[in-house]
Amino acid sequence: MRVLGISAYYHDSAAAVIEDGRIVAAAQEERFTRIKHDPSFPTNAIRFCLGRAGGPPDAVVYYEKPLLKFERILSTAFSVAPRGYRAFAAALPGWLREKLWIPLQIEDALRELGCDVAGKVHFADHHQSHAASAFFPSPHARAAILTLDGVGEWTTTAFGRGEGNSLELLQELEFPDSLGLLYSAFTYFCGFRVNSGEYKLMGLAPYGTPRYRDAILEKLLDLREDGSFQLNLEFFGYREGERMTNGRFAELFGGPERRPEQPLTGRECDLARSVQEVTEEIVLRIARTVHRETGEKALCLAGGVALNCVANGRLLREGPFESIWVQPAAGDAGGALGAALAYYHLGCGAQRAEPAGRDGMSGAFLGPEYTDDEIAATLGEHGLVGERLSLGECAERVARRVSDGAVVGFFQGRAEFGPRALGGRSILADARSPEMQRVLNLKIKARESFRPFAPIVLAERVGEYFEFSGESPYMLFTTPLVHSRRRSAAAPEDRLLERVNQLRSDIPAVTHVDYSARLQTVDRLTHPQLHAVLTEFERLTGCPVMINTSFNVRGEPPVCHPREAIACFLETEMDTLAIGSFVVEKSAVDPEVLKRVSRRVFRPD
């Protein structure tokens, strides 16, 4: 049986297809349109997924129930009227034009692709989709399930239990009480974009002190011992729809919100640290409740809040569960996959397929891939000639170039599904370099200097560098460095740039200000080519750790097609491009080719 899942119209639209329970393909629409977090109907992603499938879908499943969501929007608008009228009036045409007619849109779109799905369109609950995406691809035969996000139809948090081919959600928290919206309110107030900049807030938090923690707990929410809470809506504006926060929120935290691109101050650092600590406390309390109510030893996580790898790391270290598995596409994109899995297992009663690897996600390498012939043709179109190497030679070249201080674009195999670069569409660099964080942020990524980079490490060497003994293949856990790798560092609390540039360890480019790192372990089974690069790098340098960051520039999604990788390579100060079996050195590129390249103006993100 072949099932197509779709998510659309909020953020991170995506499609996924499963065949007899196995995940064949999954991709976000942004990778094709080049619009970051693209919310539009995922026509391109659907076309790709069906192209990887063995035939047309037997069923199509949308990741939430639009009528129930519209009921929540109407009910909320009436409850705050007339204050929310302008926002409601602005949103209404989109609902009347598109969102209330999703079955017809799906049928029309699939018909244009040669598939007749009339009468085959189904709907899953939003948090049921998240729960299915968390449990069914996980390695666990039975587990507790926890989903946390902004809001679906009405639900903002839910937990339950999965076993075999079934799952049941037992309890939930409803809008407007939402951990995701609380975190997004602080994201907005600190000058970052909602549904995009939450990871920036998480990265900013270690530079601050939690001086607003008590104010959040005393004024903004009533937190109970079981992790449930009620928000004080007098401080928020998201029900009215125009702003996440209001004047009372600004008064409580010392003035108006920071505007995007304004300099960061100590206040934003302290706000980030405070709401991060509150978030972690809520997650820990909920997890203890889930553990007590379900009696399970393993926990599966999904929903946008599950991308908070700092909270995940703390939950893994301090929480009651023996193991935790997080869906790598935990946000709304993963809802497309969850919707398909929910229908297949819960709607049809089909049994779970045995995972081919450690889990059912194939390392999250579920997106497009390109042949060497396609890559060679694209290189030629740009006036480039790559040196063709064997896999072993390519790994040796990449490792040597990184050890020499080069920045390497690494484009191999299938693209990743989810927001993290895991080695399919990555930029690699030397974690030992004290200058590399600054170089990458300013010369390659064109982004804020405070933002840390993540390390990749050979799975068999992880304990030599990090206080971590398990697997983190999806870069979804933050963990401390072992003490033997740390260096003492001190700088004035109010001088952010000085603190960014401090040497804190012997891998300073991936060591955050609190001696933590967002870790990805690399094993030979899941990613043999990246494992070979790291193995060779360790042979050359004695260090099994590199920087891995997404292959993109600010304001754009990670590259998908070879033409985007080549453009990013040419238009930035990247040194080397390893693309398929080809390696291109910037120093060997015809100067006339570089003259024709116009340096791009980076989009805000």
Image (tube, rainbow, N blue to C red):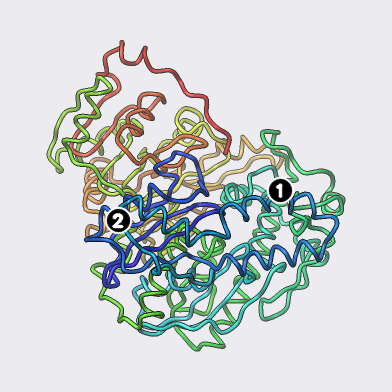
Which is more toward the observer, 228 or 476? Answer: 228
- Labelled disc at residue 90: 1
State the residue at coordinates (36%, 82%). 165
Task: Name the element at disc 1.
Answer: helix
Can residue 203 be seen by looking at this rendering? yes
Looking at the image, residue 377 lies above or below residue 304: above
Residue 242: percent from left, percent from top: 75, 49
Q: Cα distance, mark 2 to mark 1?
A: 34 Å
Does residue 368 appear to the left or right of 313 in the view shown? left
Identify the image quadrant of the N terminus: bottom left
**Residue 5 quadrant:** bottom left
Crowding at mark 1 (Cα within 10 Å: few <14, some 14-19, many 20+): few
Q: How many marks?
A: 2
Can residue 338 be seen by looking at this rendering? no
Does residue 434 appear to the left or right of 451 in the view shown? left
- Labelled disc at residue 50: 2
